[in-house]
Image (cartoon, rainbow, N blue to C red):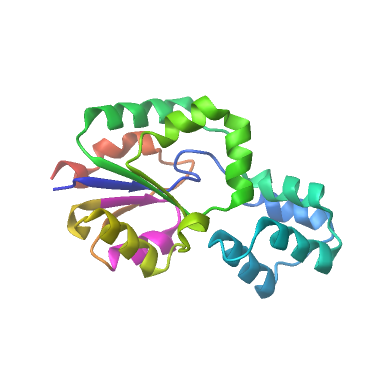
Amino acid sequence: MIKNIVFDFGDIFINLDKEATFKELATLGVSQITEEMMAVAHQYEKGEISTNDFIDFFHQNFKVNETDLVCAWNAILLDFPKHRLQFLKELAASNKYRLFLLSNTNDLHIKWIQNDWGSQLYNGFKNCFEQFYLSHEIGFRKPNADIYEFVLRENKLKAEETFFIDDTLENTVAAEKLGIQTWNLIPGKEDVVDLLMKKEMNT
């Protein structure tokens, strides 16, 4: 029986344009995504480097100024359909499941969301969850096993009683290896509001 639900954030609740940042960076002269660049982004997602260090990396290597980089970096973030918030609030109010958020994200993205949404919407969303785990705050990132083990351990959850929803297959495969049940949601074809129709939630 499912007792706990762990949600990803991007393309589960807030819509994303995953190609937008790459396109914007290309207009700024960053035409190739290098291994070093991805390593820095992953360090930033895990909170291992500061926002200033992240910005400085692009300035030193590509002469991109802070304002342009922040705009390009946040171009991935789109709207938050209100029917998803309503679904989440109703699910939280039912007290049927323990709800958690687990997101690979970073300081710049969260600050943009907080500013774009406003404190009332952001806090209303955050308060639906028992725990609100952001990778840059906890020092882990998906799909590494340690991030799932951290959530299970910290909250005394049983993997077989836990359901994880993420739009990235690599992330759900990693969770499944620990015995967590998963839904690899396909953005544009599926919506998180249909969660309770999943057969796994009714067995």
In this picture, is 17 found above or below 38? Answer: above
Quadrant in the rendering for residue 3: top left
Whether residue 127 is visible, yes or no, is: yes
Q: How many marks?
A: 0
The residue lying at 57 percent from left, 30 percent from top is 117
* Depth order, front residue of 39/107: 107
In this picture, is 31 found above or below 4? Answer: below
Q: Position of residue 31 (x, y in %)?
A: 79, 63
Q: Position of residue 83 (x, y in %)?
A: 43, 26
Per the image, is 173 magenta?
yes
Q: Is residue 114 toward the left or the right of residue 101 in the image?
A: right
Q: Position of residue 84 (x, y in %)?
A: 42, 31
The residue lying at 39 percent from left, 25 percent from top is 86
Quadrant in the rendering for residue 189: top left
Q: Position of residue 123 (x, y in %)?
A: 47, 31
Whether residue 17 is visible, yes or no, is: no
* Depth order, front residue of 26/91: 91
Which residue is the extreme one toward the bottom?
Answer: 35
The residue lying at 57 percent from left, 33 percent from top is 79
The residue lying at 61 percent from left, 46 percent from top is 109
Q: Is residue 102 toward the left or the right of residue 120 in the image?
A: left
In this picture, is 113 found above or below 166? Answer: above
Quadrant in the rendering for residue 65: bottom right
Q: Is residue 187 toward the left or the right of residue 18 in the image?
A: left
Q: Which residues are magenta?
A: 163-177
Q: Quadrant of the C terminus?
A: top left
* Depth order, front residue of 52/23: 52
